[in-house]
Image: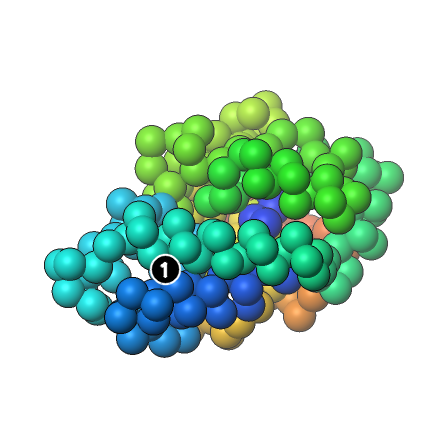
Amino acid sequence: MIKGIIFDMDGLMLDTEKLLLRFWCEAAREFGYPMEKEHVLSIRSLAAKYAIPKLKGYFGEDFDYPKVRSRRMELMNQFIEEQGIEKKKGLDELLAFLKENHYKISVATATDLSRTQKYLKNVGIDFYFDKIICASMVENGKPAPDIYLKAAEELSLPPKECMALEDSPNGILSAYRAGCLPVMIPDLDQPGEETKKLLFGKKDNLEQVIEILQNVKEEEIVSYFNLHNEE
């Protein structure tokens, strides 16, 4: 059965993906790169070593990722300091349910540790998590499986006993490759056909994840893994 829940952060727990979208575009345009929504969506949750060649493919080999990213972070941090961060719908209800029912809980995020801790503390949910795993703690970030394998290991659980909650296709792919049960709560866009094939479940908001946990049967989990092990 499911004993652990591993959360992505940006776009899943916190309504920050819209800010990432806005400020990636603003920062890139300051340096003369015509970045649009679809470019940002394609690099959601991607580690830098995967995002850099993708962006250079869009904008040319001279695309200065460190400079643009640094400016994006500056703009976004300024906005958050002034406006704060919003939690996604149903987050408090789901976290309370998980604690009451003794699930182990982790974060698996591409965001660095200091900002992750700051964001979680700022919205008053940091105490819920048993572990925080960031991309800097593993060799390969999302969509490689490393971060979910590390999160499951830190929770002392096999991946198959962990449900992974994600809002992006790259995050879902990472969780799937690790052997977790991927559940998507879409944020900026809906899953495409390839992503749908990987899902154990899909919900409109985090509170609805409680329904899965209350009603899931062991045979459904076994069936999911049997189906995907055959592929």
The location of residue 62, given as percent across then percent down, is: 15, 58
* Residue drawn 37% across the image and 41% down it: 141
* Residue drawn 36% across the image and 46% down it: 47
* Residue drawn 55% across the image and 68% down it: 18
- Quarter placement of the C terminus: bottom left
- Quarter placement of the N terminus: top right
Image quadrant in which you'd find residue 27 = bottom left
Residue annotated with mark 1: 43
Residue closer to the observer: 40 or 206: 40
What residue type is disc 1 on?
Answer: Ile
The location of residue 68, given as percent across then percent down, is: 34, 56
Label 1: state its secondary structure: loop
Instruction: Say above or below: 156 vs 54.
Output: above
Question: How is the structure coloured here?
Answer: rainbow
* Residue drawn 57% across the image and 40% down it: 115
Extreme-left residue of the structure: 61
Q: How many marks?
A: 1
Residue closer to the observer: 197 or 14: 14
The answer to whether residue 143 of the structure is visible from this angle is no
Instruction: Say above or below: 171 vs 187.
Output: above
Image quadrant in which you'd find residue 42 = bottom left
Tell me if 137 is positioned left or right of 31 in this view: right
Residue closer to the observer: 202 or 111: 111
The answer to whether residue 164 of the structure is visible from this angle is yes
Classify mark 1: residues with Cα within 10 Å, few (<14), some (14-19) or many (20+): some
The location of residue 80, given as percent across then percent down, is: 63, 56
